[in-house]
Amino acid sequence: MTGTYSDAPRLPLITLDEAREAVRLLMYFAEAGDGDSEEELDAYQLATDMADRLSSE
């Protein structure tokens, strides 16, 4: 069985600007509290992981 793929242009899952904004907001929430909650630590870890993958342009 084979599939066919559309030739129509596809939007990226997330744009670079959207990814940068997500990182910015994650860092904001990670730094908003006292730094002791698991959620704040998770937000910080996710933000740094995502930031490492973004291009610097």
Image (cartoon, rainbow, N blue to C red):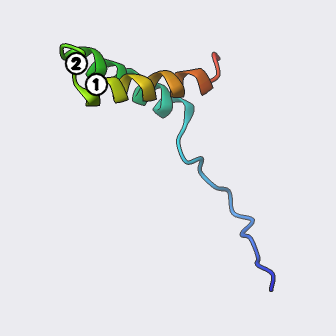
Farthest-out residue, right: 2
From this view, report whether residue 9 is shown above or below residue 19: below
Front-most of 53 and 56? 53
Q: Are marks 2 and 1 in contact (CB under 8 Å)?
A: yes
Residue 34 screen position, x and y as percent: 18, 13
From this view, report whether residue 36 is shown above or below residue 13: above
What crowding class fits label 2: few (fewer than 14 Cα within 10 Å), some (14-19), or many (20 or more)?
few
Which residue is at 24% across, 15% downward? 35
Q: Is residue 30 left or right of residue 24?
A: left
User: What residue type is disc 1 on?
Assistant: Glu
Residue 40 is labelled as 1
Quarter of the image where the N terminus is located: bottom right
Nearer the observer: mark 2 or 1; the answer is 2
Element class at badge 2: loop
User: What residue type is disc 2 on?
Assistant: Asp
Quarter of the image where the C terminus is located: top right
From this view, report whether residue 9 is shown above or below residue 23: below
Residue 17 screen position, x and y as percent: 50, 29
Residue 26 is labelled as none
Q: Quadrant of residue 53?
A: top right
Which residue is at 22% across, 18% downward? 36
Residue 36 is labelled as 2
Q: Is residue 32 left or right of residue 11?
A: left
